[in-house]
Amino acid sequence: SLLQLGRDALESGDFQAAAEAYRRALQENPDDPNALCDLGIALMLLGQWAAAADATESFLRSCPKDIMGWIRLGMNRREAGDLQKGKDAIKRALRLEPGHPIAWKELGVCYLAQGKIDQGRESLRRALDVKPSYVAACCALGETYEVEGETSRAMKIYMRGLDATRSEK
């Protein structure tokens, strides 16, 4: 099937071929939530943020409780330059699952992109409260301290992330 063809291309790293397969699948069935979801992911991996957001929004009309869909929409909107819509989508994910560490981390990144350092740090800390070994949140939070010249605090957070990666092996 075209869906499987797209998934095989996605797994092999051929994101363009995956996007084409999903588009063809959507010509046959324009409301297929699986094709819409996977098209959004392929476009995201291609860096086509606005198109990825559009596909993800279409997917979310069929699956409005998909937390990762809302997070991806927020990331796509943020990367496309619409920080407010990015935050709104991620906040929607947090309303569905208040303890989702990826949502908290991505909300923090949105706040940081807006220059709202305190809110960004607080969101990143919330991600780490939920999942103390969340390396991406450690890196993002450490970077906020490093940029502000708080090297000691940055190193503590970076070490926390490094320790988490060591313990996972």
Image: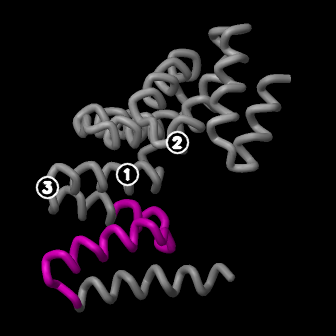
State the residue in front, 129 or 117.
117
Residue 106, numbered circle? 1
Distance CA(mark 2)–CA(mark 1): 19 Å
Viewport quadrant of the N terminus? top right
Residue 115, numbered circle? 3
First in sequence, mark 2 or 1: give its number. 2
Distance CA(mark 3)–CA(mark 2): 27 Å
Give the SS element for disc 2: loop
Q: Nearer the viewer, mark 3 or mark 2?
A: 2
Give the SS element for disc 3: loop
- Tell me the residue at 54%/44% (across/down): 45
Above or below 154: residue 27: above
Distance CA(mark 3)–CA(mark 1): 14 Å
Q: Which residues make up the magenta segment?
A: 126-151
Above or below 64: residue 141: below
Dot 1 amino acid type: Glu
Instruction: State the image coordinates of residue 7 (x, y, percent, origin top left).
Output: 75, 37
Residue density around tag 1, few if under 14, some if 14–19, many if 20 or more, within 10 Å: many
Q: Is residue 129 magenta?
A: yes
Occupied quadrant, residue 121? bottom left
- Tell me the residue at 51%/87% (across/down): 163
First in sequence, mark 3 or 1: give its number. 1
State the residue in front, 125 or 71.
71
Provide the residue designation for mark 2: 46
First in sequence, mark 3 or 2: give its number. 2
Residue density around tag 2, few if under 14, some if 14–19, many if 20 or more, within 10 Å: some
- Tell me the residue at 29%/55% (across/down): 108
Q: Is residue 146 magenta?
A: yes
- Tell me the residue at 68%/49% (across/down): 13
Residue placed farthest to the bottom in the image? Answer: 152
